[in-house]
Image (spheres, rainbow, N blue to C red):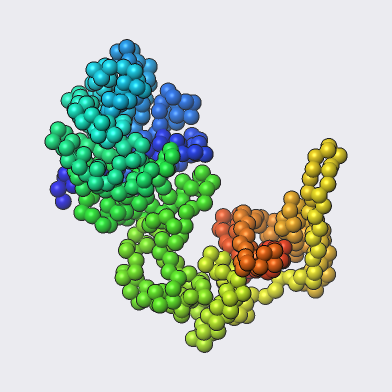
Amino acid sequence: MQAEDKIYLFDTTLRDGQQTTGVNFSVSDKMIISKNLDELGIDYIEGGWPGANPTDNDFFSRKLEFNNSNFTAFGMTRRPGRSAENDPGLNALTNSQASSICIVGKSSSFHVKNALAISEEENLLMIKDSVTYIKNKNKESIFDAEHFFDGFKLNREYALNCIKEAYKAGARWIVLCDTNGGTLPHEINDIIEEVLKEIPGKNLGIHAHNDTENGVANALAAINAGVRQVQGTINGLGERCGNTNLVSLIPTLLLKTNFRTNIHLNKLKSLTKVSRLLNNLLNIPNPKSAAYVGENAFSHKGGLHASAVAKDPVTYEHIKPELVGNSRNVVISDQAGRANLQSELKKLSISIKTESINEILEMIKQKESEGFSYDTALASFELLVRKHLGEVSEFFNLTKFRVTDERRWNAKGKLVTDSEATVYLKVKNEEKMTVGVGNGPVNAIDSALRQALINFYPSLIDLKLTDYKVMILSSEKGTGAITRVLIESTDNSKVHWTTVGVSANIIDASYNAIYDSITYKLYNDLR
């Protein structure tokens, strides 16, 4: 492999990622993310903008020891009308512990004249002075040429002059930025071919936004054209539609091209973990259809398809899921064949006879014809199978329940709605009647059940219902339609499981899903 075929990866999650609507990293978040990026093998970790806000100031003051990554500070060129030596922003960058400094500067004559309201000549001096100052401070200098591709289309000569000024001043990397994300892959290729006539590819990078869903495609186009650094974020975070998604780009480079990076194949296995770690820190769900790392990335549903996958997965999967830390998921559904079912039973360590497989398959098809879906409700699927095999007993029996809602004005004159549920159960030969209140009927039923069961099964104290979804089936029936309820639960073990309930009555469907959730919890606690 030639040295010029090496691609350097520059992660901007801690800065660009924070431009995402609703995303605000704490210092603790930044410490955790940067540690995982370093372990993955990312070349550059851009930590933020020292001097810009208290969080970044605190983060840059911490003792950070990276084994694989260059810690990078982000800022801008000197301000107009002052020297680099007397610019507080540049001094904050060079006085930080970062070994690399990435500064952004305008490369579009339109933005120079209309946004900065300065002359083109002054902007060129700002670029030159800032890069020179950073280099003289023995820091690696990186220049982000903002709005480069739009600037090139508008005024080719001036855009090239901006990046040549940075290169002549000693910038290690000149990063071409598609700041508004509107450039297409073929344009990226054509423009970079022109740039290569002035600056060698080993000094060029690409920073692409994803506004046309071409962030990764533009990065790949730039790499194929000759650039050797790529900036992006984990999970494609970033303002508007986000940035180049490194979680998609990294395995594509390693597994599908002849380019190499500093990320080794054994480290690639942590990619799914890193992706999900970030989502967990942000308290957002993991997108199931995310390339490489999503739950559905290697899911198979059709019976004939799944049978072929079982025999020859390479034909139907573009990579082995284990390479990126993911796993194959053969979905259980009414389209499922024996291969789907056997695959899922194997993951659950359930071994059964051939005739039982046929019985279970027919049972699943019947249940799904009634409105059940086990695509995601694998806890309910496991209970269905284990009950059929006689492995799960009834931990309690419901005699009846009643739910009432009252909408009223309280003593403070505020309109409130209260829910109250009464459940009648038989638990270990004892009759129990309890009343629970909640902020809705489902919450009230859950509360009443807990009160009735907690003395018999103390481990239920840490059971939490974390998500509740309702889907209306046969909507043409209006208010008489069948309702499917999915409930996600967790406990102190941090394991999550999903159960399903179906009924023409939404409260009844909810109870069925709660019943499965409690049963699944008790089965795993007591077996």
**Foreground: 131 or 117?**
117
Image-based side of 352 in relation to 449, left or right: left
Residue 486: give x, y in percent of width and height: 61, 62
Position above or below: 317 against 463: below
Residue 224: give x, y in percent of width and height: 21, 48
Image-based side of 256 in relation to 372, left or right: left
Please identify the residue farthest to the bottom as the structure is shown.
355
Residue 294 appears in which quarter of the rendering? bottom left
Position above or below: 306 against 61: below
Residue 168 appears in which quarter of the rendering? top left
Image-based side of 244 in relation to 224, left or right: right
Observer able to see residue 437: no
Residue 71: give x, y in percent of width and height: 34, 34
Please identify the residue farthest to the right as the structure is shown.
411
Q: Residue at x 46, y 79 (%)?
A: 337
Q: Residue at x 23, y 55 (%)?
A: 257
Residue 398: give x, y in percent of width and height: 76, 70
Q: Residue at x 41, y 61 (%)?
A: 297
Q: Residue at x 66, y 68 (%)?
A: 477
Observer able to see residue 180: yes
Position above or below: 429 against 128: below
